[in-house]
Image: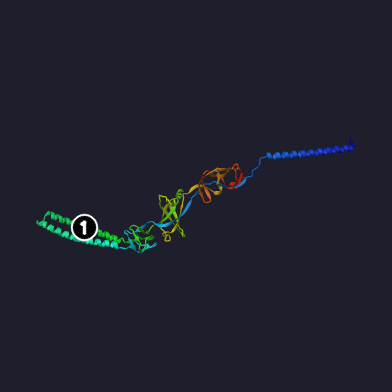
Amino acid sequence: MKHYSLNQTSVVQANGKRKLKSFAGLAVALVAIMLSGCNDHAAAPTTRATFVLTEVVQPRGMQVSATLTGEVRARCQADLSFRVSGRVTERFADVGSHVEAGQVLALLDPAEQQADVDASSAAVAATESQLRVAKATFERQKSLIASGFTTRPSYDQAEEGLRSAEGALELAKAQLGSANEALGYTALRAEAAGVITTRSLEVGQVVQAAQPVFALAQDGERDAVFDVYESIFFGGLDGSRVSLTLVSDPDVTLSGYVREVSPAIDAKNSTIRVKVTIQNPPAAMTLGSAVAGTVKTKAQRQIALPWTALMAAGSRPAVWIIDPKTRTASLKPVAIGSYEAGGVVIEAGLEPGERVVVDGGKLLSAGQPVTYEGEQL
C-alpha cells in the first residue's frame, strides 16, 4: 500500500478535479453539437425567387395580311379553230403576235371546197335552165286553157312543174351559198383584236374542223388570276380590295377587286381560282406578267404572346401566370386561335390584366416564388 503525504494528496485531488472539468466540458460541447444538428433538420428550407420576364395581357387590334403570286391574263380569251378540215398551206401569226379583228391567221388548201363551189354553181345553172323550160311550158298551157284548147290536168301539171323548178333553183342557190361559206372557212381569221397566246399548227399539218389551233387573248380588261388555298377565306377578308404589285418591278403598284371566286376546288392541288380585276392596268403589266396580290383580314381584338410563353399542361397548351399577391407562378391552360410568325394568338383562357411569363418558364414549378422586372417590392 502506498502512502501519500498531505501535499501529494492535494495534488492528486487537484488533478482529478481538472479531469472531471475537462470531461464535463467535452460532454457539453457534444450535446450542443447534437442540439444544433437537430435544429438544422427541424428548420424549413428556404426557396429563392426565380427571376423571369413577364408581360401584362392586353388585347390589341390585329390585322393579318396574306400575299400570293398570280398571273396577268385577259378577261376574254378564246380558242380559234377552222370550221372545215384540210391541210394547212400558210400561217401568218405566232405566239405573241398582236392581231386585228378580221386579220387572216392561217390558210387551208381550198381545193376540196372550191370543187364543191364549182359543183354547186353548175347545179344552179342547170336548175335555172329547167326553170326557164318549166316557165315557158306553164305560159303556153295558160294561154291554151284560156282558149279552151287544153285540159285542166295538163295546165295543173305545167304549173306543178314550174313550182318544182323554182324550188330546185332555190335549193341549188342555198347549196352554192354553203359551198362559198365553206370556201371562206379555209381562211382562219381573228374574231377580235388581241394577242396570240398559244399556237398548235404548222404548215403542212392536216387539221380537223373545230380543232383548236390558236388561243387569242382579246384586248381590253385584264385580270390577275390566283390559285389560293381555301384557308385564306377563314379569317374573314376585309372587303374585296386587293393590292397588286408587279413582281419584276415593285414600283408598279395598283389596286384591284375580286371579280370571281371559283365555286369548286381544284382536285390536283386543292386550291381555289380567284380572279381579280385590274383597274387601269399600266403598260408594264403585260399578259403573262407575274403579280403579287396582298389581302388583309378584318381587324380583331386579340391576345398575342411570343412563342417562349407557350408551355404545356398535360396534352393542352398552357402559360405561366403570376399571382400579384403571393408572387407565385401557376400553370393555366389556354386555347390557341392561330400560329403566327414569332408568336401565337390566344383565343381563350386569359383575361386582360393578367401577368404572363414570357421567358424563363422552363425553370418554374407550380407555386414557385418569382421576381420580375418592374416588380413593386
Residue lying farthest top?
Answer: 1
Quadrant of the image occupied by residue 111: bottom left
- Which residue appears at 21% of the width and 61% of the height? 126
The answer to whether residue 364 is left or right of residue 74 is right
Can residue 73 be spotted in the picture? Answer: yes
How did the renderer colour the structure? rainbow
Number of numbered discs overlaid on the protein picture: 1
The answer to whether residue 107 is left or right of residue 69 is left
Residue 7 location (% of width, % of height): 89, 38
Residue 36 location (% of width, % of height): 72, 40
Residue 229 location (% of width, % of height): 45, 51
The answer to whether residue 255 is left or right of residue 38 is left
Characterize the local packing of mark 1: few (<14), some (14-19) or many (20 or more) Cα atoms within 10 angstroms.
some
- In the rendered image, which residue does mark 1 sit on? 168
The N terminus, quarter of image: top right
The answer to whether 7 is drawn above or below residue 145 in the figure is above
Amino acid on which disc 1 is placed: Ala
Q: Judging from the image, what secondary structure is the residue with disc 1 in?
A: helix
Q: Compare residues 227 and 297 and report the one nearer the observer.
A: 227
